[in-house]
Amino acid sequence: MSKTRLGINIDHVATLRNARGGAHPDPVRAALLAEENGADGITAHLREDRRHISDQDITNLISNISVPLNLEMAPTEEMLKIACNHLPNAVCIVPEKREEKTTEGGLDLLKSMLKLKKYISILSEKNIRVSLFIEPDNTQVEAAHELGAPVVEFHVGSYCNNFTTDQVSKEYKKILSAVKTADRLGIESHAGHGIGFDHVKSIASITSIKELNIGHFIIGESIYIGLGNAIKKMRKLIDEVN
Ligand code: PXP
């Protein structure tokens, strides 16, 4: 069985840098450290308001890292152009609302089928592997299939946020069911959002989930134990169930 890939999202290194407006801490240095400590890929979200990652960060990441770059972006013409210019290994299309603190939910694919079909086709022609960030919901997985998406990333925020409540098993069942549908339709499953040390094993033990993208918890935890150690610990927890 292949190991679950670990993608490290370095957005919040840029959040910290931007709090002072200087150049420190540099997301590229964090990405290189992530590579050294077991990351299989680096994820960065270039938001429309550039609140954390900048265009220059994307250029710098592409020229410096040796693991694949997964660019998260909203489905806009501006972002499509940027992706086609930079040619990251993968693009994860995410919904974006200016006022939100973070990506609060998945895309509603049914609302923008035509636009997404065009984006998937243009990006795929450039050899960029496209994933769609969706809720663990069978209707959305079926829509992803209709769109020809090779990958979906499940927003597991509701599961992680409800981990200590009696909602947890309901949320977990939704993930299991959506992953099963993706399997049946030949779509690769990834998962992300809100994953920490407490939740990672139950998610990584779903063998059809091939990749986890984790950011905020790891960057936060690195304040206490260092970035390298936080990544190594996450990798170890994943490996224990692989
Ligand atoms: N995957 C996607 C598509 C995301 O948008 C995000 C963050 O917004 C993540 C993964 C990482 O989530 P977190 O920072 O909560 O680990």
Image (spheres, rainbow, N blue to C red):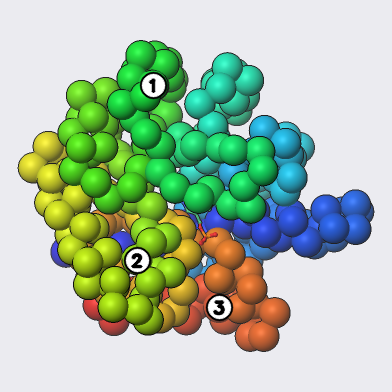
Does any portion of residue 128 appear in the rendered image?
yes
Locate residue 58, reporting x and y percent: 67, 39
Q: Which residue is mark 3?
A: 230
| Image vertical order of residue 38 relative to residue 146, above or below | below
**Are there few (<14), some (14-19), or many (20+) residues within 10 Å of tag 3?**
many
Distance between mark 1 and mark 2 Cα atoms? 26 Å
Residue at 48% over, 38% down: 94
| Mark nearer the N terminus (3 vs 1) | 1
Amino acid residing under circle 2: Tyr
Residue at 63% over, 20% down: 78
For residue 192, side relative to residue 78 (left or right): left
Amino acid residing under circle 3: Ala
Locate residue 135, reporting x and y percent: 33, 47
Distance between mark 2 and mark 3 Cα atoms? 21 Å
Give the quarter of the figure containing the N terminus. bottom left
| Image vertical order of residue 126 relative to residue 59, above or below | above
Locate residue 25, reporting x and y percent: 80, 62
Q: Residue lying furthest front in this view?
A: 166
Distance between mark 3 and mark 1 Cα atoms? 38 Å
Q: Nearer the viewer, mark 2 or mark 3?
A: 2
Locate residue 218, reporting x and y percent: 56, 71
Q: Which residue is mark 2?
A: 159
Q: Is disc 3's CB within 8 Å of ligand 1?
A: no
Q: Nearer the viewer, mark 3 or mark 1?
A: 1
For residue 99, side relative to residue 43 (left or right): right
Badge 3 element: helix
Q: Which residue is mark 1?
A: 112
